Image (tube, helix red, strand yellow):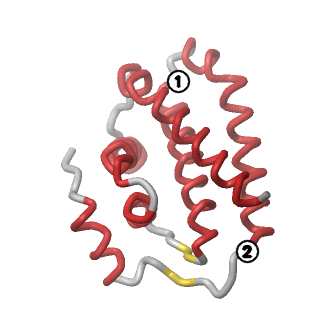
Amino acid sequence: MIIKKLEEVYPQCESEGFFIPKNFVDIELIKSKRKQIGEDITFLKENVKEFEKKKGYPLLFRNYYDVVRGLIETFVLFDKVKISNHQCLNAYFCEKYDKEEWEFLETIRLKRNSNVYYGGAITEEDWKSNKIRFELIIRRLIEEIDKRLD
């Protein structure tokens, strides 16, 4: 798994037009997405032990990835920008807000894509080694989104 440098990816995404400006901050869309993602998080938290017991690590990994991606997508809406490409979404977020998350976000993106598109395995170790990081970034993004909504 090769992770490109943020310094390469961000300008490429920018030059290829992946950062689509919007005219205003759509607070209703942000609230709606935040609510939906909150429901997903509640479901996952209520069922994580059951999925782990049944060795549903790929399902957990993919769903936690989708929650993180959805929260980042929601968060950047405050910047009046839409980004549909997952790598460019990560690049924008990391360049503007937290360069330290780049390697983690790219690792989980590549692992998820390998599983979804190419049948790559997501193992118990993949899940357990990323679970806490998933939870930390989810909590942080929720706090930031909710703070901005207040």
Label 2, label 1: how many angstroms apart (C-alpha)?
36 Å
Name the residue type under label 1: Gly
SS of the residue at dot 1? loop
Relative vertical location of residue 147 with respect to residue 88 in this rendering, above or below: above
Q: Residues within 10 Å of mark 1 (few under 14, many from 20)?
A: some
Which of the two discs, 2 and 1, labels the residue nearer the N terminus?
Answer: 2
At x 76%, y 60%, the residue is: 149
Residue 16 in view, yes or no: yes
Residue 118 in view, yes or no: no
Residue at numbered disc 1? 56
Disc 2 to disc 1: CB gap under 8 Å: no
User: Along the horizontal axis of the image, is 19 left or right of 125?
Assistant: right
Query: Which residue occupies the foreground of this view, 118 or 15?
Result: 15
Relative vertical location of residue 140 with respect to residue 148 in this rendering, above or below: above
SS of the residue at dot 2? loop
Image quarter in which the N terminus is found: top left
**Quadrant of res 47:** top right
Q: Position of residue 128 (x, y in %)?
A: 43, 21
Image quarter in which the C terminus is found: bottom right
Name the residue type under label 2: Asp
Residue at numbered disc 2? 26
Q: Residue furthest bottom?
A: 23
At x 41%, y 20%, the residue is: 124
User: Along the horizontal axis of the image, is 101 left or right of 39?
Assistant: left
**Quadrant of res 43:** top right
Q: Position of residue 144 (x, y in %)?
A: 63, 51
